[in-house]
Image: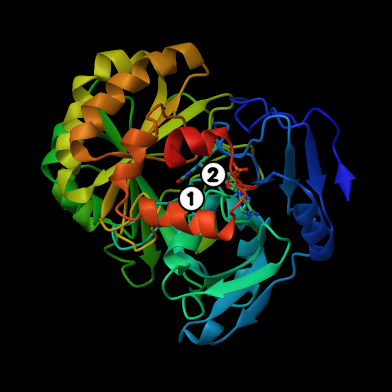
Amino acid sequence: MTDQGTDVGTTWGGTHRFEATRLHRPTSVDQLRELVAGLPAVRALGSRHSFTALADLPGGDLVSVADLPAEVTVDADGAGIGAATVTVGAGTRYGDLAPQLLERGLALANLASLPHISIAGAVATGTHGSGDRVGSLATAVAGLELVTADGELLTVSRSSHPDDFDGMVVALGALGVVTRVTLTVEPAFEVAQTVFDDVPLDAVLAHYDEVTSAGYSVSCFLPWAGDGVQVWVKQRVPKHSADAFEPMRELLGLPPADGPRHPVPGVATEATTEQRGVPGPWFERLPHFRLAFEPSAGDEIQSEYLVPRDRAVEALEAVRALGPMIAPLLFISEIRTMDADTLWLSPASGRATVGIHFTWHPDPAGVLAVLPHLEAALAPFDARPHWGKLFVAGADAVAPLYPRATDFVALAEQMDPTAKFRNPFLAEHLFG
Ligand SMILES: Cc1cc2nc3c(=O)[nH]c(=O)nc-3n(C[C@H](O)[C@H](O)[C@H](O)COP(=O)(O)OP(=O)(O)OC[C@H]3O[C@@H](n4cnc5c(N)ncnc54)[C@H](O)[C@@H]3O)c2cc1C
């Protein structure tokens, strides 16, 4: 087990320098259990893709599960739930799991915009891709193995913990250190993606349901300056192959883009996944970015607010009204959809959801000055901030957005009575 000394470094985006003084990397579950049992406080750290102090523990200890054994096991009738499942080390990156699934003829239903994120970290914050009929990544979780505050190894599933399981999945690291995750899988499938340039924002808003249902997974990118939206349509093939893009052509009267595109105007396209309707494996099309490249625009800050689908167009109009304030700070904004789920702290809990995402320039002061205006404009729509991205709302505003937040706090107090897994971020934004 290594201990990385006193500089734990920063988040992926360089947006937060960790104030924890030690990072442990146990290589066996027994080492992890001994560590957790012996420490007064500890936080799990994933692949550092959150933008805030969410995973941090000032002056304390962090632990990574990335060096635990990561073998992949497939169960054709996983956990007796009537669907195949795969169980994998929690620190595994989606991009490393995906080819192993394909070798076995399997797939996950969806992925986030990039494959570099750890499974446990993504699940813990309700990370999502896009798709009207696809849930966030955490909805694939059929079971978890975690080291709890007393150092015990606990295995949970919906059947073993029918009352609490929905509270244990999107858990922000507050219930224990997850060591293995069991995910529902399906037969492997292929996806073709096509990009449409300069779709008028008015047309997107007027036909929002048709636009987002034009593919299995649809993302709309826009800078909130001017009127052009770049629409990425990812379609499962061959089911819909020949006429995959007809709905968009008919609806918007636009041909697909004439070459590869990056969501951020002017950025080279080599890091983006194949477009122009060329079919390929699910994991090489559902993320926008390839595993082999460092994605996105480099140094950046991200924020995202998730609103109920039936208020999405109103919410987007409210953001549009702030365009002159937002646009100068923005690389790009992305709008995605997801199906409702039952997970207590999932941003899509209890409601079909639209995520309004912002990739900001690395200007913390500028972004922090705009966020209160953005949050005030989106408050009438019960906008839930993405747990892993930058937001300013405190617990008094955030907790009431989740009908089961009180139950989650009670579960955390029961499983972790000494608050071993809590930190100042959770106190400020959820526990109060
Ligand atoms: C370039 C980029 C692109 C992104 N794209 C998307 C996207 O498409 N969709 C989206 O929704 N979000 C996206 N995000 C946000 C990202 O998915 C979340 O912040 C996610 O939580 C990061 O996972 P991580 O492994 O880096 O976790 P970390 O940031 O390291 O930690 C996040 C949380 O997970 C907990 N955690 C981590 N590991 C464990 C464990 N083993 N046991 C218990 N708790 C654990 C931590 O304690 C912490 O609370 C993106 C972020 C970046 C930087």
Compared to residue 136, the image places residue 252 above or below, namely: above
Q: Secondary structure at mark 2?
A: loop
Estimate the x, y position of residue 347 in percent, counting from the top left. Answer: 36, 49
Tell me the number on the disc at residue 315: none
| Quadrant of the image containing the C terminus | top left
Q: In front: 362, or 346?
A: 346
Q: Which residue is mark 2?
A: 289
Q: Quadrant of residue 335?
A: top left
The answer to whether the residue bearing label 1 lies less than 8 angstroms from the nearest atom of ligand 1 is: yes
Compared to residue 109, the image places residue 64 above or below, namely: above
Indicate the amino acid at tag 1.
Answer: Ala
Disc 2 crowd rating (10 Å Cα; few below 14, some 14-19, many 20+) is many
Q: Which residue is mark 1?
A: 112
* Residue at 25% across, 56% down: 351
* Residue at 44% across, 61% down: 167
Q: Is residue 382 shown left or right of residue 140? A: left
Distance between the Cα atoms at labels 2 and 1?
10 Å
Compared to residue 90, the image places residue 293 above or below, namely: above
* Residue at 45% across, 48% down: 275
The answer to whether the residue bearing label 2 lies less than 8 angstroms from the nearest atom of ligand 1 is: yes
Q: In front: 186, or 396?
A: 396
Q: Is residue 135 shown left or right of residue 363? A: left
Disc 1 crowd rating (10 Å Cα; few below 14, some 14-19, many 20+) is many
Indicate the amino acid at tag 2.
Answer: Phe
Residue located farthest toward the front when viewing the structure as drawn: 417
Compared to residue 402, the image places residue 392 above or below, namely: above
Q: In front: 283, or 140?
A: 140
* Residue at 73% across, 49% down: 64
